[in-house]
Image (cartoon, rainbow, N blue to C red):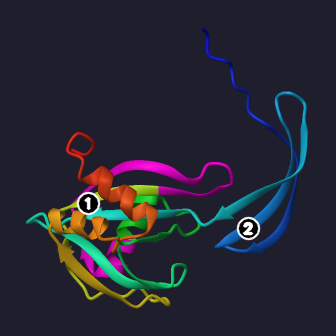
């Protein structure tokens, strides 16, 4: 049996319904499926592209943040990260976010993977980085609405925190799974 050839959909029109740059753009598209069927109200959500950083200090402990996440209405552990500024590369954003949120900088950076938050609506492009040999060189200064506490944990403690539901952000969970998989990261 031969696999069926899958064709992309054709976007015929796009109308922006709501815009709040750089955080959110909502548009409605008219799309044509490969079989000719027309869908007149396919919604496309565009959120700001972002980075997630799995950073380790020289002894291997992982840098996490304890902070209130309003979207889930509770305090959670998460990894450093945030949105890309206009024209900023993912690596530059990862390095900036690590320094701003934790006061750490790292010597060794590796892009573990890019990913899309929601394949049907796109939402945003995320980039997961691993950073090794991070050292604190300044006090944290995120400069925004984020109040947070830097926490260092062993890899085993991070896994326990995931199992206990203390880490709920999908990007952080994916970064932890990738970074702690010895066959995936160098």
**Residue sitting at x 20%, y 65%:** 56
User: Magenta region: which residues?
Assistant: 97-126
Q: Is residue 165 magenta?
A: no
Prevailing SS of the magenta stretch: strand
Residue 131: image tag: 1
Above-or-below relation of 155 to 110: below
Residue furthest to the top: 1
Q: Relative to 149, is 186 on the left or the right?
A: left
Marks counted in the figure total: 2
Above-or-below relation of 39 to 61: above
Horizontal and vertical percent for residue 28? Answer: 84, 58
Q: Residues within 10 Å of mark 2 (few under 14, many from 20)?
A: some
First in sequence: mark 2 vs mark 1: 2
Horizontal and vertical percent for residue 12? Answer: 89, 43
Q: Relative to 162, is 33 on the left or the right?
A: right
Q: Residues within 10 Å of mark 1 (few under 14, many from 20)?
A: many
Q: Relative to 95, is 106 on the left or the right?
A: left
Query: Which of the 4 image quarters holds residue 167?
Result: bottom left
Residue named by callout 2: 25
**Residue sitting at x 55%, y 79%:** 71
Instruction: Choose mark 2 or mark 1, whichever is in front.
Output: 2
Determine if residue 128 is in view.
Answer: yes
Determine if residue 92 is in view.
Answer: no
**Residue sitting at x 24%, y 72%:** 63
Work out whether residue 162 or residue 111 is closer to the camera in this orientation and state it: 162
Q: Is residue 113 magenta?
A: yes
| Element carrying mark 2 | strand
Residue 114: image tag: none
The CA distance from mark 2 to mark 1 is 31 Å
**Residue sitting at x 19%, y 76%:** 152
Query: Which of the 4 image quarters holds residue 173?
Result: bottom left
Quarter placement of the N terminus: top right
């Amino acid at each position: 049996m031969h696999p069926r050839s899958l064709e992309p959909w054709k976007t015929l029109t796009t109308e922006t319904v709501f815009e709040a740059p750089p955080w959110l753009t909502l548009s409605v598209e008219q799309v044509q499926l490969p079989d000719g069927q027309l869908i007149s109200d396919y919604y496309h959500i565009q959120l700001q592209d972002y980075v997630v950083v799995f950073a380790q200090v020289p002894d291997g402990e992982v840098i996490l943040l304890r902070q209130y996440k309003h979207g889930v209405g509770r305090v959670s552990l998460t990894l450093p990260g945030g949105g890309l500024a206009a024209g900023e590369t993912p690596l530059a954003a990862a390095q900036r976010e690590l320094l701003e949120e934790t006061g750490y900088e790292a010597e060794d950076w590796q892009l573990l993977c890019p990913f899309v938050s929601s394949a049907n609506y796109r939402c945003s492009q995320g980039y997961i980085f691993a950073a090794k040999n991070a050292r604190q060189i300044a006090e944290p200064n995120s400069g925004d609405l984020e109040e947070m506490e830097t926490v260092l944990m062993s890899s085993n403690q991070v896994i326990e925190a995931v199992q206990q539901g203390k880490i709920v952000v999908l990007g952080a969970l994916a970064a932890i799974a990738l970074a702690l998989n010895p066959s995936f990261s160098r």
